[in-house]
Amino acid sequence: MSKHVVRGGDVAGLLERFAQLRKKTRTRTGKIFPFVVIQEAGLDGFWIDRVLQNEGIESYVVDPASIATSRRRRRAKTDRIDGEALVRALLAYKRGEPRVCAMVKAPTPEEEDRRRLCRERKVLIAERVRHVNRVKGLLFSQGISGYEPQRRDRRERLDTLQTGDGHLLPEHLKAQVRRELDRLELLLEQIKAVEAERDVLLAAQQVAAPATMLLDIKGIGPEFAAILWSEGLFRHFDNRRQVASYAGLAPTPWQSGSIDREQGVSRAGNPRLRTTLIQLAWLWLRHQPQSALALWFEERVRRNGGRHKKTTIVALARKLLVALWKYVTAGVVIEGAVMKVA
């Protein structure tokens, strides 16, 4: 295997290298062979794959975790070894060998851009939590508790706070808290802006669109509907196992000789979709207590004597995802589910 180095992002250099290889093979064989390219799914996203496909090149994006590696505790790892492993995986995949690797289905630019709103909101919420905790920690170190930085009167209350020993807040500490509040207020404005963009995006969908159908179910709000739609249900799945596997909720069997047991879910899937589904499963029990899924959960927990609720809620999340997939694709209403009143 020959190795050539092209500077990152140099598309012209990459296409020039392809032209040189094509010229070399045509000189040696008198034939023109098509290119087949493979790359790992990583921080570069999918723009390279789109560039190659626009040039008429057959391109594949592979999940690097799906390629088998040595089980030795310490093994050599270099770019050359990784490149050879990718080429061997591509050859086996083109030969039709099953389960040699898992190719990633690249989303369209519109689908990729649509899911940025929910992901940005999650990042902003995490930053908001950090700033709120930092303000509370600064004040708690002076014996002050009960201060809520997210209240509208946060600045007025800050001027009236007293330390545990009866003194007003020190000057520099108060200035630091005010700067934290400045960053917190900026985050609150950005969260509102992102949520407004999300609502506009959902409102622009057609009546039969998956996001609109999800909003009709009691207990599913704009945020859950947007995440379920943009992170998973916009894709095409052939069966229920593919749906569960994409969310990292599929069971993992272990069979070897006389050993036959279950290892639990693999969690090798979309973490945002999996987290949202587990949260939705808990809320489903509250908002849809008479649905078939909620009754199944209660019966399962009762048979276990009230134990293993966390394990059972993961199973409920898997069943709920499959039921929602059937609902948005085939119109099969979840048994016993209550719809919102128009």
Image (spheres, rainbow, N blue to C red):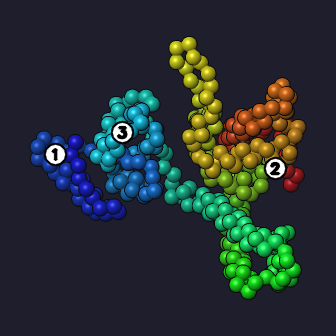
Q: Residues within 10 Å of mark 1 (few under 14, many from 20)?
A: few
Q: Is residue 98 visible?
A: yes
Amino acid carrying label 3: it is: Arg
**Does the rendering let one see residue 83?**
no
Residues under labels 1 and 2: Cα distance? 61 Å
| Image marks 1 and 2: residues in contact by CB distance under 8 Å | no
Look at 79% across and 44% down and name the residue there.
282
Residue 237, x across and y down, in percent: 58, 38
Q: Secondary structure at mark 3?
A: loop
Q: Residues within 10 Å of mark 3 (few under 14, many from 20)?
A: few
Image x and y of residue 173, in percent: 72, 81
Label 1: element kind: helix
| Rendered residue at 32%/47% (across/down) | 78
Q: Considering only order in the chain, which callout, 2 or 1, is on the residue closer to the N terminus?
A: 1
Q: CA distance from mark 1 to mark 3?
A: 35 Å
Q: Which mark is residue 25?
A: 1
Q: Amino acid at mark 1?
A: Thr
x, y percentage for residue 304?
81, 27
User: Which is closer to the viewer, label 3 or label 2?
Assistant: 3
Q: Report the residue marked by disc 3.
A: 75
For mark 2, give the secondary structure.
loop
Q: Earlier in the sequence, mark 3 or mark 2?
A: 3
Q: Observer-nearest residue: 253 or 14?
A: 253
Please give the label number shown on residue 219: 2
